Amino acid sequence: MDRFINYNGNIISSEEKIISADNRGFKYGDGIFETIRVANDNIPLDTFHFERLFLGLKLLQFNIPSAFSAKNLTAHIKELCKKNNRQQSARVRLTVFRGEVTINEATNDIPQFIIQTDNIPASALHFNEEGFVTTVFPRGRKTCDIFSNLKSNNFLLYSMAMRYAHENKLNETILLNSKENICEGSIANIFFTKNKTIYTPPLSEGCVAGTMRKYLVEKFKTSGYEISEQRCTVNDLENADEIFLTNAINGIRWVKYLGKKEFKNEQTRQLYDSFIRNLF
């Protein structure tokens, strides 16, 4: 992590202690976050990021002051990137949370926030030629409710799925929902192709409403591709022609193996070249 962060609009040292033991974001996961890529002092997909952020804050019943706006948050992000010398390339995390009260007390619904910057991994700068190795996460399931599409600070299921991937020398794990259908990856949305049609689970299946997912679904629809948002099973995924994962940092990541099943990448590479290569 870089030397400086932004805490509620002020740039401070990243080593400064700012969260108390009674912070609701820390104690209860009461908040949401955005993971944002900065490229050449711009924020690709910025409209999608801030639209998702403010819809989420509304759903969580935050009281949004006028100063807490997309315009001001953009300025804070760019200012911090400049301070950390990350204007050309940065991974930014914007975390929004409630303040220091117990779960039984009346809450302070004014959003507090932290902005952090970090480097973009070299692997995110090009198509992943070696392909990802994945499997289905066996130890937990994602619920499907009105909060499922948020990037919630309550990140336990995803954290344990990533831990499982690391323990088993995998790049990713695939999460199922409570109906045993395909949901998403631990840090990505999931797509697959079959007979030239592109499929992805609908938001009603509990997946995070990914900004890259939204961008690609819109691009596919306006560029002549057959795209279907529908429920899919592990069997559907195992019988796919190709599988790829998407998020705001990496764009598209080709999945070469799901368990022992190997997949090709001809259409995935074409989609990457058409919609990701020049996005950043």
Image: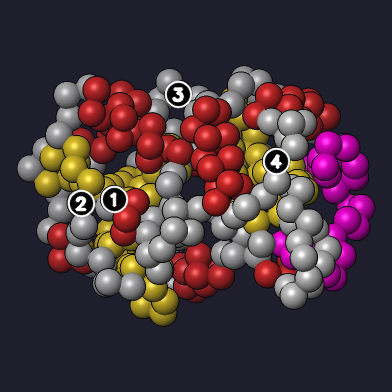
Question: Which numbered mark, 3 or 2, is in the foreground of this view?
Answer: 2
Q: Is residue 35 left or right of residue 94?
A: left
Magenta segment, which residues?
1-25
Instruction: Using the numbered discs, state the Cα–Cα distance from disc 1 to disc 4 in whole angstroms.
Output: 29 Å
| Position of 65 relative to 144 (above/below) | above
The mark that comes first in sequence, 4 or 2, is 4
Check if residue 107 falls in the magenta segment.
no
Q: Residue at x 85, y 70 (%)?
A: 21
Question: Which numbered mark, 4 or 2, is in the foreground of this view?
Answer: 4
Q: Nearer the viewer, residue 68 or 223?
A: 68
Residue 279 x, y percent position in the rendering: 45, 23
Three-letter amino acid code at the position of disc 2 = Gln
Quarter of the figure with residue 218? top left
How crowded is the residue under tag 4: few (<14 C-alpha within 10 Å), some, or many (20+)? some
Can you identify the residue that label 1 sits on? 202
Check if residue 5 falls in the magenta segment.
yes
Marking on residue 279: 3
The mark that comes first in sequence, 1 or 4, is 4
Residue 115 x, y percent position in the rendering: 74, 42
Three-letter amino acid code at the position of disc 3 = Leu
Asked which secondary structure carries label 3, the reply is: loop
Instruction: Using the numbered discs, state the Cα–Cα distance from disc 4 to disc 2 in whole angstroms.
Output: 34 Å
Can you identify the residue that label 4 sits on? 64
Q: Circles 4 and 3: CB distance less than 8 Å?
A: no
Instruction: Using the numbered discs, state the Cα–Cα distance from disc 4 to disc 3 in whole angstroms.
Output: 31 Å
Asked which secondary structure carries label 2, the reply is: loop
Question: Which numbered mark, 1 or 4, is in the foreground of this view?
Answer: 4
Q: Circles 2 and 1: CB distance less than 8 Å?
A: yes
